[in-house]
Amino acid sequence: MGDPGTTAGAPGPTTAPGATEPTTAPGTVAHLRIYRRFVRARIRADWQYRASFFLFLAGQTLVAGADLAAIAVIFTAVDDLVGWSGPEVAFLFGASGLSFGLCDLIISPVEHVGVHIKAGSFDTFLVRPVGALWQLLAHDFALRRIGRLLQPAIVLVVSLRLVEVDWGPAAALLVVLTVVCGAVIYGAVFVVTSSLAFWTVETQEIANAFTYGGNVTTSYPIDVLGTWLRRITTFVVPLASITYLPAAWLFDHPLPSGLPRAAAWSGPLVAAAAALVARAVWALAVRHYRSTGS
Amino acid sequence: MSLDPPDRHGYRHTPRSPFGGRSAARTRTTTRSGEAHLRLYWEVARATARRMTTYRAATAAGVFTNTIFGFVLSYVLLAVVRDRPIDGFDATDAVTFTFVTQGMLMVVGIFGNEEIAERVRTGDIALDLCRPYDYQGWWAAAAYGRASFYAWARGVPPFLAGALVFDLRVPAAAGTWVAFVVAVTLAIGVAFAWGFLLQLAAFWIIDVRGPSQLGWVAAQFLAGTFVPLALFPAGLEGVARALPFAAMNQLPVEVFLGDRTGGGLLAVYAHQLSWLAALVALGRLVLARAVRKVVIQGG
Amino acid sequence: MDALIELDDVEKTFVVWTKAGRLRRTRTEVRAVDDVSFSVEAGATLGFVGPNGAGKSTTIKMLVGILVPSGGRISVMGVDPSRDRVAVARRIGVVFGQRTQLWWDLPLCDSFELLRHVYRVPAADHRARLTELVELLDMGDFLATPVRQLSLGQRMRGELVGALLHDPAILFLDEPTIGLDVVSKEAVRAFLARLNRERGTTMLLTTHDLVDVERLCDQLLIIDHGRVIEDGTVEGVKQRYGTERVLVVDLEAPGPPVQIAGVEVTRIDGPRQWLRFHRDRHTAASLLAQIGAEASVRDIAIEEPAIDDIVRGIYSRGDDVLGVSAR
C-alpha cells in the first residue's frame, strides 16, 4: 500500500544532490519482495519453536471445532436450515471461515498498530524508505496464525465433496474468488478499524465487532435472518456478497431480495471497492499521525 | 511480540497488576483480621469496576458484537425450532435464551482472563504470593468487580436491542428476578474458579494460552452459549448438565425463563454450589502445590 | 552552496484536549516549536541541547519526516521531508537511543540483511561496509546473537551499524549514549568522531549528556520552550559565556582566604583554595604572581568552563553565567 505524499511507482527526477538511486517510494512489486523477505526471516525465527507451533495449530483447530460442533448439533435436530442442507451450510461456514483465516494470517498485524504507536516503534517504520503498512504487516507476521484457517479449509473441502453441484470451470472459479474476495473484504475491515487506533486506543473491540460479527453472519444462510437484517447485510453492509450470494448461485438457491443471478459474481467489485476505501482511510490515518504526532 | 488473536468473542485482557488503582494501594493491609480482608476485597472489586468504565469505546463495540451475535443466533434458532419443535422450548424461549446468554457472557466472564498466567510468566507472581491475603480471594473480588460493571454495561443493552425486534420473555414475578440474580452470582463464582484452575497451569506449562483457550471453548460450548442444551442430542445433553459448565450459563438462563421453580430451582443452586465448592477447593489445592513448587525451584 | 539542512521559521503547534468537568473538553494549542531557524553545513556535527519538553524531539521528528510542521520550511538535502518522506529516508540514518530499529528475536546479522534490502544496498557494497563497521566497533563476537540477548552497549553498536549500512549523508542520533556505561559511551563517541572525520558524515545529535557535545560537536544549538536560545559553535559559546575560570591553589599551609580585587574565594579546604576570577580582568599568571607575593604556593590547577555548566546557566537564564565546573 502506498504512502501519503509520494509519487507512487512513477520514476521521478532525483532530487537529492549526489544521489545515484531513485528517490521515490517503492512500487507494489518492490514492496511485495521486501514483505516476502521479512516474512521469511520471521518464519525462520519462529521455526525454532516448532513444538509449540504445532501444539498451537492443534489447539486452534480444536477451538474452531466448537463452532463446527454447534452446526453439527443443529443438524442433528433438523435436516435443513431454511432450505439449506448440512453440507451447504458447511460450505458457507468453511468458505467464510477460510476467508477470515486467510485475512487473519496476513492482515491481522495491523491490529497492533496501537501498540507500536504507544511504544514509539511506528516512528521507526516512518524513518525507513518503505511503506509503513507493509512494514507493520511483515514485522508481526506469525506463521502459527495458519491454525485459524486450517479447520475451515478442511470443512470447506469436505463440504465441496458432499454438496450436489455441477462442477465446471465457472463454479470452481467462483469458489476461489469467494474465498479470496472474502479475505480482501475482511482485510479492508481490519485496516479501517485499526486505523482508528491513530485516534483512539480502544480499537480492538471495535474491530472485533465487525470482523467476528461479520464472520458469524456469513456462516449461516442469510435467508434465516429477518427481512430487515437481510436487507442491511445485503445492501448496506454487503456481507452477503462475501459467501452467501456465490453459494446461492452454486447450489441453485434463489438470491435474496430478487437480485439477478449475476450478482453472485459481485465479490471482486466489492473487494476492490473495499480495498480502495481501506487504502484511503489508512493514508488519512498516517497523515493525521504525522501532523499530530500521537 | 506476544500478541495473540482474540478469541471468538473478541475478548482479550491485557495483563495488569492486581495492585492497580489507588484504592487498592490505600487499603493494602498487613493485619489478618477477617473484616480487614473483606474490606480489601471490596476495594479490589470497586477498583476493578471503576477501571472498566474508562473503556467506553471498547464497551460500546462489545455491546455491538453481542447484539449482532444475538440477532444472528436468534434467527438461526428460530429456524431450527420452527422446523423441529422442542418440548418446553418455544420460539420466545429460544430468542430470550440467546439474548440473555449474550448479555451474560461478559458478566460471568466465560472467556478467561490471562492475568494470572501472565504474572507467572513474568515472575511477578512471587510478589503476589508474599502478600498477606487470600490469593484466590483477591482474584475472585476482581472478577466480581468486573461483573458488576458488565452487568449494566454489557448485560442490559443487547437485551434491550433484542426486545426492539423480538417478543422476549421477561420475568413478571419479582421472585424470578431474585432467583436469577442469585443464580448469576453463583455462575460468576463457578466460572472464576474454573478460570483460576486453568491459569494455575501456567506454573507447569510455559505457554498456557493453548490449554486455557481450549478449556474455555469447551466450557462455552457445554454451557450452552453456542447452542442451547435443549438442542443437544440426549446423551450429550445429559453429560453437559452434569458438568460445572452448565452452571455458568444454561442453568441461570433457565431460571430467567421461569423454567426453574421450587424444587427445580433448588436443584440449580445445589448444582452450582457443589461445583463451586469443588472447583474452589481444587483451586486451593493446586495453588498450594504451585506455591511449593515456586519456593523449591525458586520461581 | 546551500546548507545540507535548512530550517526557516519552522513552527509546530499541537492541539491538546484536556478534560474540563465530566463531559466537556477544552482545546488548547501548544507551541512545541516556535519559529526555529538554523542550518547545518555538510560535514558538520550539530549538538541539539535543551531541557525536557523543549522541542528537541519534535524538531528532529520534523527533520526526518515523522512529523509534519505547522508552518515554515524545512529542507534536508534539498528535499522537504514532509512532502517526500521516502526520498529523505533513503539518504539518512536514524538512531533512537531509547528504541530499537532492529528485529528483536532475530540475530543481529539477519537484521542487517533485512535492512540492506530496505535501503536497496548492493550485496558487494553491503559486505564491504559491514565488515568495515563490524571491525571498527568490535562486534564480531555477537553478530549471530539475537538482539534481545544483547547488552545495551552491544545493542547500541548494532543500532549504529544498522543506521550506517547504506552510507547515509546525514546521521540523526536521538540520545545515543543514554544508559550506557562509561566505556561504551567512549567507544560510541570515538566511533562517531572518526566517522565524521573520515567520511564526512553530517551528524545531528540530541543529548542530555553534554560531554557528548563537548567531544563530538562543533556546532551547538540550545532550544528551550520551542525557541532557539543559542546557535553557534561550541567553542564560541564557551568563549562567550565561559568568562570565568577557577584557579585552584595549594598553599604551603592553611591560611585565611586570599584577598585580591575582583577575585572571589569560593571554597577553602585546608591549604587548598578555589579562586574564581573573570578572565578579562585577570590572567592566571598575574593572579599567581599576586598570590605568590603573599604566600607560598605549592601547586596549582586551572578549571576551565565546562559546557555542562554553561548550558545549565543558559537554561536558568542567569545574568552571570558561571564558568565553574562542578567537581
Image (cartoon, coloured by chain):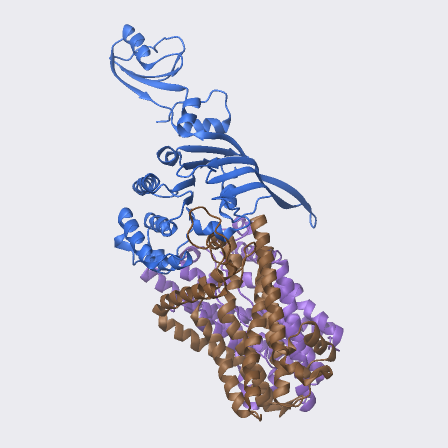
Chain colours: A brown, B purple, C blue
Taking depth in this image into account, of C50 and A57 the one nearest to the observer is C50
- Residue beneath the point at 50% across and 23% down: C318
**Does residue A210 appear left or right of residue C116 in this picture?**
right
Taking depth in this image into account, of B43 and A137 the one nearest to the observer is A137
Residue B205 vertical position relative to residue C263 in the rendered view, above or below:
below
Residue A32 locus on image (x, y percent): 46, 66
Taking depth in this image into account, of A72 and A220 the one nearest to the observer is A220
Q: Is any part of residue B15 visible from this angle?
A: yes
Residue A163 vertical position relative to residue C31 in the rendered view, above or below:
below
Residue B208 locus on image (x, y percent): 43, 69
**Does residue A156 appear left or right of residue A252 in this picture?**
left
Q: Quadrant of residue A47?
A: bottom left
Q: Is any part of residue B241 visible from this angle?
A: no
- Residue beneath the point at 41% across and 29% down: C234
Residue C248 vertical position relative to residue A217 in the rendered view, above or below:
above
**Does residue C6 appear left or right of residue A214 in this picture?**
left
- Residue beneath the point at 40% across and 48% down: C168
Taking depth in this image into account, of C136 and B52 the one nearest to the observer is C136
Residue A182 locus on image (x, y percent): 57, 75
Spot the residue most to the top.
C293
Residue B245 locus on image (x, y percent): 54, 77
How many numbered circles does the render carry?
0
Residue A196 vertical position relative to residue A153 in the rendered view, above or below:
above
